[in-house]
Image: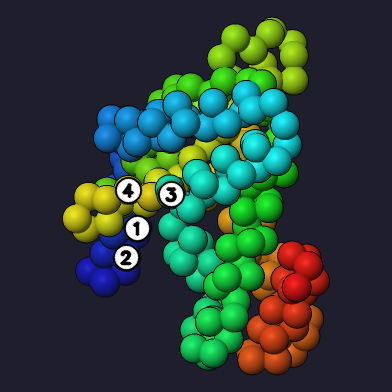
Amino acid sequence: MQTSLASPARSFLAAVAFAAAALSPAFADESAEAFVSQILVEANSVFGAADVETRNAGIETLVDKYVDMNRVARFALGQYARVATDEQMAVYRPLFRKYATSVYQSTLDAYTGETLEVTGSVDRSARDIIVNSKVVGAKPGGQYADLVVHWRVYRAGDGAQTIVDAGASGVWLAIEQQSTFKSVIANNGGGAAGIDALIADLKAKVGE
């Protein structure tokens, strides 16, 4: 009899604990906000570049400086990162860097001439922080009026911070890349053969 009563009691307490956790306030992260604000100071000058070549070169510099490309590259492989050989990763990483940089360039091209500013942040954990930003002076009803540009910050054990994803209005670049990459790998047999197919696909995309 005691056993039959204990299970519902535990379930109830677990439900209460879950609800309490869900209602707990998320605290802003001033360090991560300052980090992204500094990036945006540099990015806003890039967005104002007079020509595409200068703008793209500026974005590439920012990506190399602030994005943890190795971490993002592994994330994009999903579970297949565990089966990729050292030789495959040596080929894949530079290809991914070129591909991801081109995605950042094409995505951020939408903000040419605009200025972004940090509006707040949410700590997902001590090392995983989402910083939000918006277009300064966006006109009510305009294309940027309700736009939220997100920056996912990873904080290492020593406190160093890097960008590991970016997106707008809930759509994340690295998550989209992972979905696409996993599909390519799975559709080509998975494992080493699938990763070789992904590498071939990336070579075609970056013109190698």
Q: Secondary structure at mark 3?
A: helix
Residue 139 tag number:
none
N-terminal of the two: label 4 or label 1? 1
Disc 3 to disc 4, C-alpha distance: 11 Å
Dots 3, 4 in contact, CB < 8 A = no
Where is residue 90 drawn, in percent x and y?
A: 53, 82
Residue 65 tag number:
3
Where is residue 36 drawn, in percent x and y?
A: 41, 34
Where is residue 39 drawn, in percent x and y?
A: 43, 35
N-terminal of the two: label 2 or label 4? 2
* Image-based side of 155 in relation to 203, left or right: left
Question: In the rendered structure, which amino acid carries the disc numbered 4?
Answer: Gln
Q: What residue is shown with label 1? A: 11
Q: Which is closer to the viewer, label 4 or label 1?
A: 4
Disc 2 to disc 3, C-alpha distance: 53 Å
N-terminal of the two: label 2 or label 3? 2
Disc 1 to disc 3, C-alpha distance: 48 Å
Q: Which residue is at a point 71% across and 78% down the rendered structure image?
A: 198
Question: In the rendered structure, which amino acid carries the disc numbered 3?
Answer: Lys
Above or below: residue 140 compared with residue 34: above
